[in-house]
């Protein structure tokens, strides 16, 4: 099956809190469409977007089928002058500063701080979290929080400095996460929710090897 999954008649809206989720448990949650910000895990098949009820599409990339597109190669070349590092998910002062710039992109429901999306100890609570840092000279210009399950990598939240928007840093951090997942021998890259139809989140659909969850327990190829 290709295209968007048939989710019209399925309504799921569930949530729970967890202080600790191990890698094998995280696999099961990701495979069933769960996401989390901090200790709150949730999954929902329908949501409001632009005053419409939209079907939610949990997405993942089957890494064995992923290939870089021409535009993605251009993004990598455009950022050949930056340094990328991955380590424990510590929220340092420059991360707070970057988020203060990043949240200027929000026009409504402006988040107060990065802790809207990660816990106060994101390196161990509720999972073993990592942070991907992108620096230009001494400046942090992009960062993303991620976690490893037994079989996959889940991207939790990404941000970038708006003064460097022309670099395509949102796509760049995703590509570096995909690269890291491959290096770690993972099978899947889980990069969050999008919506059926056009939306702000369509950038998540522009990857090869893409699969969508149909809320019936199946992941199917998405084109």
Image: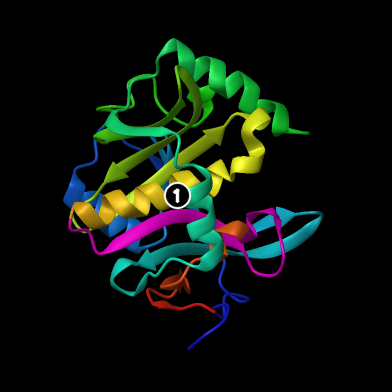
Who's the residue at 39% across and 70% down the image? Answer: 67
Q: Which contiguous range is marked in magenta? A: 185-202
Residue 95 coordinates in the image, percent (x, y): 47, 20
Residue 139 coordinates in the image, percent (x, y): 49, 19
Query: Within the magenta stretch, is there residue 107?
Result: no
The answer to which quarter of the image holds residue 66 is: bottom left
Q: Nearer the viewer, residue 208 or 194?
A: 208
Q: Is residue 15 visible?
A: no
Q: In the displayed image of the protein, which residue is found farthest to the top?
A: 93
Q: Nearer the viewer, residue 48 or 84?
A: 84
Who's the residue at 24% across and 34% down the image? Answer: 128
**Left or right, 49 with reference to 59:** right
Residue 63 coordinates in the image, percent (x, y): 31, 66
The answer to which quarter of the image holds residue 219 is: bottom left
Q: Which residue is mark 1?
A: 174
Query: Within the magenta stretch, is there residue 189?
Result: yes
Q: How is the image coloured?
A: rainbow
* Quadrant (top left/top right/bottom left/bottom right) for the C terminus: bottom right
């Amino acid at each position: 099956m290709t295209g968007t999954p048939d989710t019209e008649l399925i309504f799921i809206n569930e949530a729970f809190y967890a202080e600790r989720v191990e890698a094998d448990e995280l696999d099961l949650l990701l495979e069933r469409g769960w996401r989390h910000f901090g200790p709150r895990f949730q999954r929902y098949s329908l949501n409001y977007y632009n005053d419409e009820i939209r079907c939610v599409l949990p997405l993942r990339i089957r890494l064995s089928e992923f290939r870089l597109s021409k535009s993605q190669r251009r993004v990598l070349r455009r950022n050949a002058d930056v340094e990328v590092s991955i380590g424990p998910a510590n929220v340092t002062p420059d991360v707070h500063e970057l988020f203060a710039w990043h949240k200027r992109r929000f026009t409504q429901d402006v988040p107060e701080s990065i802790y809207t999306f990660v816990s106060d100890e994101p390196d161990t609570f509720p999972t073993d979290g990592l942070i991907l840092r992108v620096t230009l000279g001494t400046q942090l210009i992009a960062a993303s929080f991620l976690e490893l399950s037994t079989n996959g990598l889940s991207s939790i939240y990404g941000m970038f400095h708006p003064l460097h928007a022309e670099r395509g840093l949102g796509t760049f951090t995703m590509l570096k996460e995909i690269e890291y997942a491959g290096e770690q021998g993972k099978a899947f890259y889980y990069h969050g929710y999008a919506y059926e139809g056009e939306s702000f989140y369509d950038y998540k659909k522009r990857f090869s090897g893409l699969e969508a969850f149909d809320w019936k327990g199946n992941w199917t190829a998405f084109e």
